Amino acid sequence: MDELLIYFSDMPTLHRTALLVGGLSFFFLFESLAPFFTKKHNWWKHTGINLFFTLTTIIVNFAMAFLLLQSADWVVAHNFGIMQMIDLPIWISILIGLMVMDFVGAWLIHYIEHHVTWMWKFHLIHHTDQHVDTFSANRHHPGESVFRFAFTILAVFVAGAPVWMVFIYQSVSLVMSQFNHSNISFPLWLDKILCLVIATPHMHRVHHHYRMPYSDTNYGNIFSIWDRIFQTFVRVDNRKLTYGMDTHMDVKSTENIVEMLKIPFQSYRPRIEYESEEKL
Ligand SMILES: [Zn+2]
């Protein structure tokens, strides 16, 4: 156990890169062998755009990483946050740390992004993807990457997460995001069992439906319990879904990097209200 914590205390950048590339490769292979949707599209163009936004996400996170590490050292030095204040067996402490970081650093900021207009205009780029697959996981506007990062720091303070906990969380979060965005097909009964605890592809696809109320459900990244607790959890037949966002369905702009980067600085386009949505 100690060796694991020592490893995650100083996880090499090369290993983190290998996890990113390895995860994408694994789920891409899975998607190719057993795809859920088989709709044809320009895969190279689509993936190129999503890899561009993955790269900007990495750059933003890398540039600000020192803030995260300093925060983690500070909470340990000052005995601050849940993991520092409550003395629990290490496995329980890790699980609680992971849950708190997933809630504050992913679910909560994601929910806020959907309800605060200026944040939504940044997060919208993630939702304009009309062919969601594992490469969509990090399709984030660089501006969104900044305020998501701020909530990861907030999560460190609430959880009292040491550096090793931060790296464990980021590793699990990365792979889970690749998993729940992946266009993979596997038995529904297995998905239902997994979904009792974690956010599965069947669950997260609903979040990428092009209209409300479905786009405002299933926010979870690692755990599905937050959506169950806050009553934003739904199960929908995934075959009925259409990816994208009703305000931005023009493929010419949603597959154009410059157009995507400009969206937060353009006038706000309200989404179609709940009442007019047909039930799926
Ligand atoms: Zn969203």
Image (tube, grey):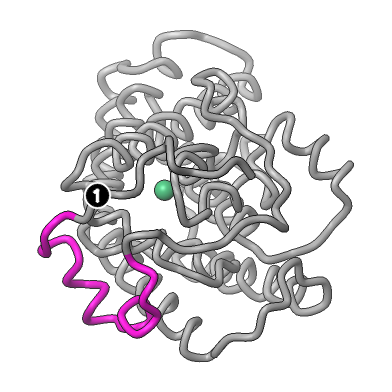
Placement of the N terminus among the 4 image quadrants: top right
Please check the rendered image and state whether residue 130 is part of the magenta-colored stretch, yes or no. Answer: no
Secondary-structure class at tag 1:
loop
Q: Position of residue 74 (x, y in %)?
A: 25, 29
| 143 relative to 169 in the view: left or right | left
**83 or 28, which is in the foreground?**
28
Q: Quadrant of residue 248?
A: bottom left
Q: Quadrant of residue 196?
A: top right
The residue positioned 53% from the left and 54% from the top of the image is: 209
Q: Mostly what secondary structure, the magenta segment?
A: helix
Please check the rendered image and state whether residue 249 is part of the magenta-colored stretch, yes or no. Answer: yes
The residue positioned 80% from the left and 37% from the top of the image is: 192
Mark 1, residue position: 270
Q: Position of residue 29 (x, y in %)?
A: 74, 77
Q: Which residues are magenta?
A: 248-268
| 176 relative to 189 in the view: left or right | left
| 172 relative to 153 in the view: left or right | right
The reply to whether the residue tagged 1 has its Cβ within 8 angstroms of ligand 1 is: no
Give the farthest residue toward the top.
86
Q: Is residue 83 above or below residue 118?
A: above
The residue positioned 65% from the left and 44% from the top of the image is: 203
Q: Is residue 277 above or below residue 205?
A: above
The residue positioned 49% from the left and 20% from the top of the image is: 230
Placement of the C terminus among the 4 image quadrants: top right
Instruction: Specify the amino acid type for callout 1.
Output: Pro
Q: Is residue 118 above or below residue 162?
A: below
Label 1 Cα neighbours within 10 Å, binned few <14 / some 14-19 / many ≥20: few
Q: Position of residue 65 (x, y in %)?
A: 28, 54
